[in-house]
Amino acid sequence: MAISAFLSHPSQGLVSVMDDGWPNLPAFLPLMERAAEALATERTAFAAMLTAIDRRSAELLPQRELTWVQRVVRARKSSGDFWERHANGEQLAVILRKLVQERGGQGEDREVLVEVADALIEIGVKGAAHFQQALVRPTTPEHPK
């Protein structure tokens, strides 16, 4: 799949080849956004995108990117094979849990994150419970992120 070639090296699983500080990333972001819109419901392309996001979440997962995650979850909610392939469901839960721990999961993100957490739990993704717990925990000095 073309998106896999852009984002990852498929031998030994999917490993992102976008180095930290890659100077072409800003020019590449519009292509990533179009790819997310067009290809993300294909299970290997989704896995490749998750691999890239895990590596570069600050640049690749702003709020607007959460909407494509939401669309994929809605489109593939009943497809167990999609979520099991490349551990897509577990990997998504881990990435979103880290996102919540880093950014707090408030504001515009919250509605999407709650919907995705609920859907992943329904699908049977075990890591989704930890993701959901991160969403409901307060982020105060007594309860750090």
Image: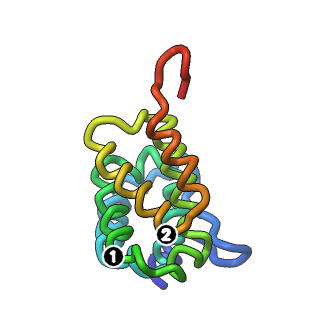
Looking at this view, name the residue that lies furthest to the right. Answer: 12
Q: Residues within 10 Å of mark 1 (few under 14, many from 20)?
A: few
Residue 2: x and y in percent read: 46, 82
Residue placed most toward the observer, 140 or 2: 140
> Residue 27 lies in what quarter of the image?
bottom left
Q: Residue at x 68, y 73 (%)?
A: 13
Q: Which residue is mark 1?
A: 75
Vertically, is 115 above or below 122? above
Give the mark count.
2
Amino acid identity at mark 1: Ala
Residue placed most toward the observer, 80 or 49: 80
Per the image, label 2 sits on a secondary structure element best described as helix
> What is the CA distance from the residue labelled 1 to the residue labelled 2?
13 Å
Looking at this view, name the residue that lies furthest to the front. Answer: 122
Residue 106: x and y in percent read: 34, 35
Residue 89: x and y in percent read: 54, 66
Horizontally, is 56 left or right of 69 in the view? Answer: right
Amino acid identity at mark 2: Ile
Q: Which residue is mark 2?
A: 123
